[in-house]
Image (cartoon, grey):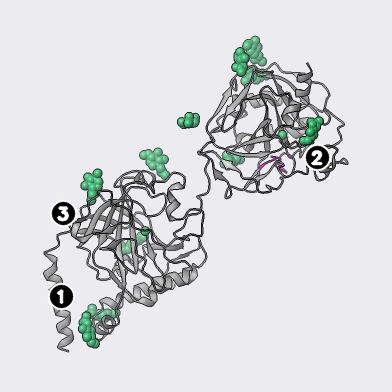
Amino acid sequence: MLLSSLLLCLSLGALVKSATGSDWCYSNCDNTPSTWEYLHGASCGGKRQSPIDIDTNLVKADLDLHNFTFVNFSSKHAFKSMINNGHTVKFNLVDGEVEVSGGGLKETYSSIQLHFHWGDADHHPGSEHKIDGKRYPMEMHIVSVKKDLTVQQATETSEGIAAMGFFINATEDGDMSPTWSNLTSYLIDVTDEEVDMYHNISIDDLIKDVDLTKFYRYLGSLTTPNCSEAVVWTVFHEPININKNLIQKFPEKAGFRNVYRPTKPLNGRQVWASRATPLPSPPWCYGDHCDYTQSQWHLLPNNLCDSERQSPINIDKSNAVTEKKLDAFHFKHFDNKTVIEKIINTGHTVKCVLKEDVVEVSGGGLGNVYSTLQLHFHWGSQDSEGSEHTVDSKRYPMEMHIVSKRKDLNLTEALQTPDGLAVLGFFIEATSAEEKSNSSSSGQNMSSSDVDAWGQLTSYLSNIQNINSEVKVTKELSIDDLLGNVNVDTYYRYNGSLTTPSCNEAVVWTVFKESIKVDKNLMTMFPTELGYHDVYRKAQDLHGRTVYTTAAASRAPVSIALLLACLCAFYFK
Ligand SMILES: *[C@@H]1O[C@H](CO)[C@@H](O)[C@H](O)[C@H]1NC(C)=O
Ligand SMILES: *[C@@H]1O[C@H](CO)[C@@H](O)[C@H](O)[C@H]1NC(C)=O
Ligand SMILES: *[C@@H]1O[C@H](CO)[C@@H](O)[C@H](O)[C@H]1NC(C)=O
Ligand SMILES: *[C@@H]1O[C@H](CO)[C@@H](O)[C@H](O)[C@H]1NC(C)=O
Ligand SMILES: *[C@@H]1O[C@H](CO)[C@@H](O)[C@H](O)[C@H]1NC(C)=O
Ligand SMILES: *[C@@H]1O[C@H](CO)[C@@H](O)[C@H](O)[C@H]1NC(C)=O
Ligand SMILES: *[C@@H]1O[C@H](CO)[C@@H](O)[C@H](O)[C@H]1NC(C)=O
Ligand SMILES: *[C@@H]1O[C@H](CO)[C@@H](O)[C@H](O)[C@H]1NC(C)=O
Ligand SMILES: *[C@@H]1O[C@H](CO)[C@@H](O)[C@H](O)[C@H]1NC(C)=O
Ligand SMILES: *[C@@H]1O[C@H](CO)[C@@H](O)[C@H](O)[C@H]1NC(C)=O
Ligand SMILES: *[C@@H]1O[C@H](CO)[C@@H](O)[C@H](O)[C@H]1NC(C)=O
Ligand SMILES: [Zn+2]
Ligand SMILES: [Zn+2]
């Protein structure tokens, strides 16, 4: 009897006095939230107070936050009574009926009540927790006490109370859920009396389709005096969506509004998230100034960076196996001068995004038609090389990647298919001084057209010096212009991966033998304009994979003949 009356008083901390006329409030009394810390015996000025603003950029995944076990959440007989105590409306649960465990909780907790925090209908949202600064219209708290502890003992134990917060989101025309309609039908003005409940409502009915595997976890406090620092908090990521007219009933029928405590500082606490919770991708980098350096990429969520089909690799010429099926490529619309839509500084590379479904790559032994999405670059620094692939351990100054996706798959599917993506890798080397002067003096246009295209491309770099900035491409520039006269008939082929997290093993790699020649000053603009350098991944283990090479013997005489022709043109001038 004593225990149950204690239970009734617990409105997540309404322990000081129950019902009306208590000595604290949210507004219009002597002790509003800013002075709760001065209340006698209260912990409201402590260092692990709730609620908080959950900054998802600072949240870390905790793989030990497994699924919850909820006992009798589906029971239609869990609700006992309702009381409006002047701070909230509280729904008491039948003693010993509902339990919570799992979800990273160390013990089993017995659920005793649930209650609500709200704002002012349409005018002001009233959830207690916030996510990335966003406050939802309402929040529901399910309060559970560690089994076998009294409420008094629980408030004096670090994790004596487990509170679960559900955001409530207002929809314009969402369904008038019968359960929520029935629940709100109990809302009444402030009273000292408990109202018995006879509707057959279950907690599951209230939670509806919220994904209970997605949640945040931190250690905090009761959000009302005396703010005992005894709560292990679970805040679910997905809100319960209910019609705004139902939300409006809370301030309307209860007779008060804006019953939530402002968020409190974290004071160094870590907020964790279950594995299924979507988080902004954590920062990875090539160097050592971030959370996940190259050697730690495999610790990032959902990645394959430590797997056995990774890229880039060192190509050992003498071990490359000649493969006759590696025939000529067909490049569709590589000559289209308006196909590059924009250039983006991703913070890891410069990416040229192409207009969708225009450029295509096929042939070249690929066996599928691929639709080209983007091209991007890897570079070193002003005085170090930065290609990703190496040939007989030689690293080239830069490497360009043209990324295409199998035309019959969407990107999600392609990333999960062994040959879902085809990447064409081109080494980039400096035009030597002689080549430049020779070509101009000999009247050859080949190199000079390269200089134009690369000059145009690099002229955009000064406009995207900020990470995530982008610029629309207005100058005429085709992929062919960037390739110049590079030989596209001789190349290496192997099965590999994306060279950045999540390192999906979905790439059929083509690495061309001949390099594109670009003016050294233009190449230098990549590290200097973008402000980061050495953006390449180290060579990965082959793990027994075969690297194939084109035969291309038939091409050689042609090239030699061309070269001779050039030389002759020069010598006979
Ligand atoms: C957790 O629950 C989800 C959805 O209910 C399920 O897909 C997943 O397999 C569960 N995980 C474990 C470890 O039981
Ligand atoms: C769950 O509900 C059933 C049926 O109402 C009841 O017998 C049981 O005691 C409840 N509690 C637990 C913890 O199983
Ligand atoms: C909240 O409700 C609005 C409609 O009022 C909807 O557009 C939005 O997606 C919902 N938010 C979430 C996180 O479900
Ligand atoms: C809600 O209440 C109505 C009548 O007030 C009743 O017909 C219906 O069964 C109730 N639904 C639930 C889920 O309790
Ligand atoms: C709740 O369920 C009981 C039977 O379990 C039934 O007698 C009663 O009428 C139901 N209440 C409502 C409001 O539907
Ligand atoms: C108030 O908080 C203190 C310290 O957390 C605790 O010892 C005390 O029992 C609490 N008072 C009540 C009435 O729970
Ligand atoms: C180049 O691609 C655009 C679509 O991005 C298309 O409208 C245009 O006709 C193409 N030009 C040529 C010459 O094919
Ligand atoms: C990709 O296709 C699959 C079905 O094959 C579909 O379930 C999925 O939603 C699609 N993804 C996108 C981003 O369109
Ligand atoms: C370029 O011209 C220089 C003399 O100016 C000559 O020594 C060199 O062999 C030429 N190189 C080529 C590739 O033609
Ligand atoms: C060189 O390019 C110019 C225009 O840029 C063109 O008029 C000329 O015909 C080209 N010469 C050769 C040999 O292709
Ligand atoms: C890539 O893997 C597929 C499937 O295992 C295989 O058929 C194909 O020959 C491989 N290609 C190369 C270049 O290794
Ligand atoms: Zn609460
Ligand atoms: Zn790349």
Amino acid type shown at disc 3: Glu
Between the residue at mark 2 and the residue at mark 1, the CA separation in whole angstroms equals 85 Å
Q: Which residues are magenta?
A: 119-129
Left/right placement of residue 19 relative to residue 123 reads: right
The overriding secondary structure of the stretch rendered in magenta is loop
Whichever of labels 1 and 3 marks the residue nearer the N terminus, that label is: 3
Q: What residue is shown with label 2?
A: 26
Q: What residue is shown with label 1?
A: 562
Left/right placement of residue 47 relative to residue 104 reads: right
Q: Is mark 3 within 8 Å of ligand 11?
A: yes
Between the residue at mark 3 and the residue at mark 2, the CA separation in whole angstroms equals 77 Å
Amino acid type shown at disc 1: Leu
Quadrant of the image occupied by residue 338:
bottom left
Q: Quadrant of the N terminus?
A: top right
Q: What residue is shown with label 3?
A: 323
Q: Position of residue 234 (x, y in %)?
A: 62, 35
